[in-house]
Image: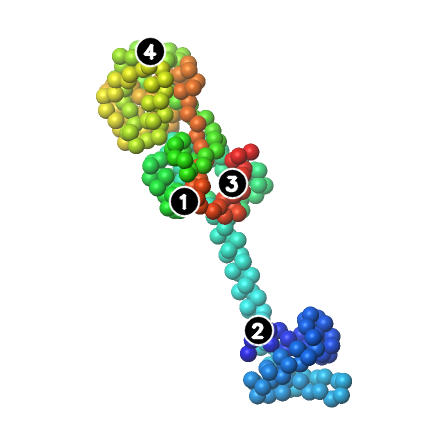
């Protein structure tokens, strides 16, 4: 017994006319007759009673019809459910992001995307991490996209989505604390607390230092911004970092740089060797606008 046979049976049971049923099914009348006769052979019962040109359902056919209809209806519902699940799955995007983007850049980007789409049907799964770890996840397909600085890897495509201004964090009692802005020349003799070499922002700042012929007096490196901020509070040194909520207190002063090129670009990144799902493609296309 096949789905095709059940479908042919249900249509024939409704119209009770071979020519009309064949037309509705877009098949020839002989094909319809053959298929129904094979179904009757398998069931070992007659489903239709043919008297001249008049066709009626037998008592067996009448008994079998609601079961056949329910079977086809259940399969149709199952097919629709699979379509729903597939549609939902393709609308889920795994998005990695660096910590410093989570307070303004990430939520702003996602909100603008929802506004552009006119709906919130796209579901994001967020993964926070360091740039190096996120890059590994991007390459192995654990995440679809990521928001971070430029990793300078040829196989990773990038689209700039924001500028992240960098500030000089100093204790409130520091001699530079009352300045409106600073430059690298102002901190030539200062002890500098740096983020670890593994962070992209380290490479960004190293490039800026080299271009300005500035040699930083790095006293130690921290694994995360919270450690840097804590060290600045204790007077161990000063630090260059993005503005983060952890720094909004009276013990720290954030000074902008007069040279606005100290800011860094934040990108939406993807691995060029991975095919994009329709949902990921929409986000990528939006970022490039």
For the residues labelled 3 and 1, the Cα–Cα distance comes to 14 Å
* N-term-proximal mark, 1 vs 4: 1
For residue 123, above or below residue 38: above
For the residues labelled 1 and 4, the Cα–Cα distance comes to 41 Å
Crowding at mark 2 (Cα within 10 Å: few <14, some 14-19, many 20+): few
Residue at 30% x, 32% y is 198
The residue most toward the right is 53
* N-term-proximal mark, 3 vs 1: 1
Residue at 32% x, 15% y is 214
Residue at 51% x, 35% y is 287
* N-term-proximal mark, 3 vs 2: 2
Crowding at mark 4 (Cα within 10 Å: few <14, some 14-19, many 20+): few
Q: Which residue is mark 4?
A: 186
Residue 62 percent coordinates (x, y): 64, 82
Q: Quadrant of the N terminus?
A: bottom right
Specify the label residue 283 is tagged with: 3
For the residues labelled 3 and 2, the Cα–Cα distance comes to 40 Å
Specify the label residue 64 is tagged with: none
């Amino acid at each position: 017994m096949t789905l095709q046979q059940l479908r042919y049976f249900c249509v024939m049971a409704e119209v009770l006319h071979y020519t009309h049923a064949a037309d509705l099914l877009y098949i020839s009348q002989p094909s319809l007759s053959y298929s129904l006769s094979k179904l009757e052979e398998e069931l070992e019962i007659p489903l239709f009673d043919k008297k001249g040109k008049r066709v009626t359902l037998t008592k067996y056919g009448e008994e079998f019809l609601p079961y056949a209809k329910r079977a086809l209806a259940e399969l149709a519902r199952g097919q629709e459910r699979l379509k729903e699940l597939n549609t939902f799955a393709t609308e889920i995007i795994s998005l990695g992001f660096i910590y410093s983007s989570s307070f303004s850049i990430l939520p702003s980007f996602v909100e603008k995307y929802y506004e552009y789409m006119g709906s919130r049907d796209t579901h994001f799964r967020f993964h926070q991490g360091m740039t190096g770890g996120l890059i590994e996840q991007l390459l192995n397909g654990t995440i679809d996209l990521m928001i971070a600085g430029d990793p300078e890897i040829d196989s990773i495509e990038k689209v700039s989505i924001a500028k992240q201004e960098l500030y000089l964090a100093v204790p409130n009692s520091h001699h530079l604390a009352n300045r409106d802005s600073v430059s690298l020349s102002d901190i030539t003799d200062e002890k500098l607390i740096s983020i670890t070499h593994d962070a992209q922002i380290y490479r960004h700042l190293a490039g800026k230092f080299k271009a300005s012929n500035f040699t930083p007096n790095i006293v130690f490196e921290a694994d995360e911004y919270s450690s840097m901020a804590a060290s600045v509070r204790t007077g161990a040194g000063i630090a260059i970092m993005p503005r983060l909520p952890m720094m909004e207190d009276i013990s720290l002063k954030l000074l902008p740089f007069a040279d606005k090129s100290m800011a860094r670009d934040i990108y939406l990144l993807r691995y060029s060797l991975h095919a994009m799902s329709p949902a990921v493609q929409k986000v990528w296309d939006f970022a490039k606008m």
